[in-house]
Amino acid sequence: MNLTKVLKVDSLNPAAEYLEEAAEILKVGGLVIIPTETVYGIAANMLNKVAVDKLYEIKKRPKDNPFSLHIDEKDKIEDFAIKIPVVAYKLIDRFWPGPLTIILKSKDLSTVGLRLPDHEIALRVISLSGVPVVCPSANLSGKPAPVNFQEAIKDLNGLVDLAIDSGNTRLGIESTVVDLTIEPLKILREGAIKKEEILEVAQRKIVLFVCTGNSCRSVMAKGLLEKKLQEKGRADVEVLSAGITMLGGLGATDETKEILRREGVDVLSHRSQKITKETVQKSDIILVMERLQEERVLQLAPEAKNRLFLLKEFAKIKDNDLDITDPIGRTLEFYEKTFGTIKEAIERVVEII
């Protein structure tokens, strides 16, 4: 039996040629031991049946117990999963890259486990390989997951084609595994992330207000809703705001600052930001000021349709126009009228979230 080729790689400054060699072996169906921040794993090309069968044989794992995928970018979950719930995006936003494996519905209507590791070597090898990579822990069945290279290679020398040695893993404990195919979610394995941390993020509601420039209407709505929630002792809701324009980093308009100051709300530190797909995906409810923003949100994330509303729908409407007109460049009196409509809607919103 030939011994496994070992490459010693500095995790802070990994040699590119070593990573490329590992990626090429993966691509053609070889097995490679790689480090992650949790434990060492055995990486294999998911699309190569011979490689995956060999991995099952080495691990002595039944084939009805699939391996989780390791990916190198957050948005790649959509390459492998369908009907992704909002809670998945909340957990991803908080814990990826990191020691969290999430179970989702797969495109073949079964399930798939996905993780984005927080380790430069693992991420670069996966990226360079250009193939979907499964990566179970580098240990034989019944033995503990290896937290350093010596433990990883001990029983696998000669069974894999290449092994990367980067010393001890940073966390030394396996990832937490959360099943999101059922409701409420189920924690299948408590690892580096504690159950309480998972539940805190999962149960926290996120409300997103969207306008054009994120300098007046959405700022008013956010500031007022935060105040109302504080008055009710609600610490389980996070309020965000964003705009659809390219500009970012601007403060609130002077009129907005003045109107909110009268309400006891300070927005002096506000800086505008552009809406992103990620922000929409993790929000439980998205409230826009005009149909223009509604269209933009749906372009970014069509799946958000059932969570998307015009804010004025929650006000006591006296006309058929559901748009809250942009007050930018208008008089203070116009701003005050705009704020009145927003305030009326927020009074109802705070009661239903």
Image (cartoon, grey):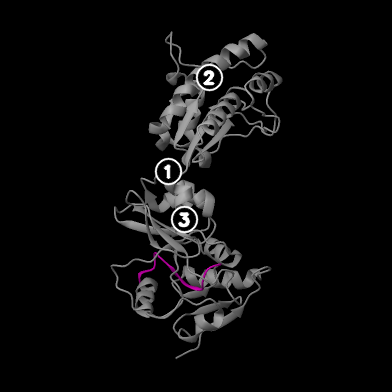
- Which numbered circle lies on residue 234? none
Q: Residue 194 at what x, y percent from top left? A: 48, 60
Q: Quadrant of residue 132?
A: bottom left
Q: Secondary structure at mark 3?
A: helix
Q: Residue 265 at what x, y percent from top left? A: 64, 27
Q: In this figure, which residue is indicated by the disc labeled 2?
A: 342
- The reply to whether the C-beta atoms of the residues labelled 2 and 3 are less than 8 Å apart is no
In the shown orientation, is residue 113 left or right of residue 32? Answer: left
Q: Which kind of residue does numbered mark 3 sit on?
A: Glu
Query: What's the distance in space between the residues labelled 2 and 3, CA to CA?
Result: 35 Å
Residue at 65% in and 32% down: 272
Residue stretch in magenta: 37-49
Quick check: is 47 in the magenta stretch?
Answer: yes
Crowd rating for badge 2 (residues with CA inside 10 Å; few <14, some 14–19, many 20+): many
State which mark lies toward you, 2 or 3.
3
57 w.r.t. 207: above or below: below
Q: Residue 16 at what x, y percent from top left? A: 64, 68
Q: In this figure, which residue is indicated by the disc labeled 1?
A: 86
Q: Secondary structure at mark 1?
A: helix
